[in-house]
Structures are given as structure tokens and as C-alpha cells.
Image: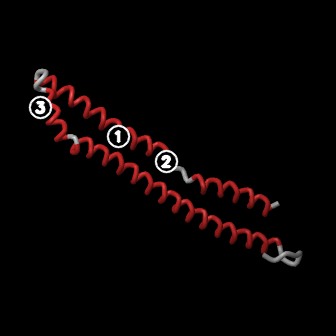
Amino acid sequence: MERGDDRSLGDLFSELSRQTSTLVRQEIALAKAEMSQKASQAGKDAGMVGAGGAIAYAGFLAIVAAAVLLLGKAVDWWLAALIVGVLVAIIGGILIKMGLDQLKQTSPAPEQTIETLKEDKEWAKRQVS
């Protein structure tokens, strides 16, 4: 940008308008990139919840059957199935909670973009004054 008194007020406002337009386009691009990154992380965390649920269901089916059969020798079959079922549900719940906790830690707001927009606002104020 030129410095000097030879530019008109119209030229200065025109230059400010061009710079502001460029800045806004760059901020939009930054917001898109940041939101994409956050969505990717949320997808991974949701995958962890799904994997935890699948493992809790599929991985423990054989163990559940064996545990019910083993415990069925000591108590009634219905009670053996109930005890083992409660334990499996607790394990699955723990895995799901771990994934949900990870999801909660991911903020959907584009914090970086918000911060730079605040800085841009201050820059624009200084350019006008």
C-alpha cells in the first residue's frame, strides 16, 4: 500500500474495501478448514463409540455363553444369565461413555477463526481511524 498524501479519500476507501474483501475470503477459507478438521475428529470419536458398542456386543457373546453355562452349574439358569448380562452391559456402557466423553471434548466452534476475526475487526478499526 502506498504512503503519502497524493491519494484521494476515494482511493483509500477503495483500497480498504479490496483488502477487507480479501480478508473476509481468507477468514471463510480458514473457518471451512477448521470446521472440516473438527468434523473429522468428531467422526473418529463417533467411530470409537461404534467400535466400543460392537466389541461389547460381538466380542463378549462367546464369553457370555461360557459364563452363563459355568455360572448355571451353581445357580438357576435365569439368574446366571441375568448376572452375566448385567456385567456385559456395564462393560459396554463404560466403552460407550469413554467415546462420548471424547466427543464432548471436541468443540464444534471454529475458535481459531473467531480469534482472527476479532483481530481483523481491530485492524479494520485502525485502518478507518
Percent coordinates x, y for residue 22 in the rendering: 64, 70
Q: CA distance from mark 2 to mark 1?
A: 16 Å
- Answer with mark 1 or mark 3, whichever residue precedes in sequence: 3
Q: Are marks 1 and 3 in contact (CB under 8 Å)?
A: no
**Element marked by disc 3:** helix
- Decide: few, some or many residues near mark 3? Use Cα within 10 Å; few <14, some 14-19, many ≥20: some
Q: Which residue is mark 1?
A: 96
Count the marks: how many?
A: 3
Q: Which mark is drawn over residue 6?
A: none
Q: Amino acid at mark 3?
A: Leu
Residue 112 as seen in the image, left or right of residue 88:
right
- Answer with mark 2 or mark 3, whichever residue precedes in sequence: 3
**Image-quadrant location for residue 94:** top left
Q: Amino acid at mark 2?
A: Thr
Which quadrant is home to the N terminus? bottom right
Q: Which residue is mark 2?
A: 106
Name the residue: 46% across, 42% down: 104
Q: Are marks 2 and 1 in contact (CB under 8 Å)?
A: no
Query: On screen, 58 above or below 110?
Result: above
Query: On screen, 47 above or below 56?
Result: below
Percent coordinates x, y for residue 91 in the rendering: 30, 36
Name the residue: 35% across, 45% down: 49
**Image-quadrant location for residue 69:** top left
**Image-quadrant location for residue 127:** bottom right
Percent coordinates x, y for residue 90 in the rendering: 30, 32
Q: Which residue is mark 3?
A: 69
Which quadrant is home to the C terminus? bottom right
- Which residue is outermost to the top? 75
Q: Give whichever of 126, 34 is nearer the camera.
A: 34
**Eye-nearest disc, 1 or 3:** 3
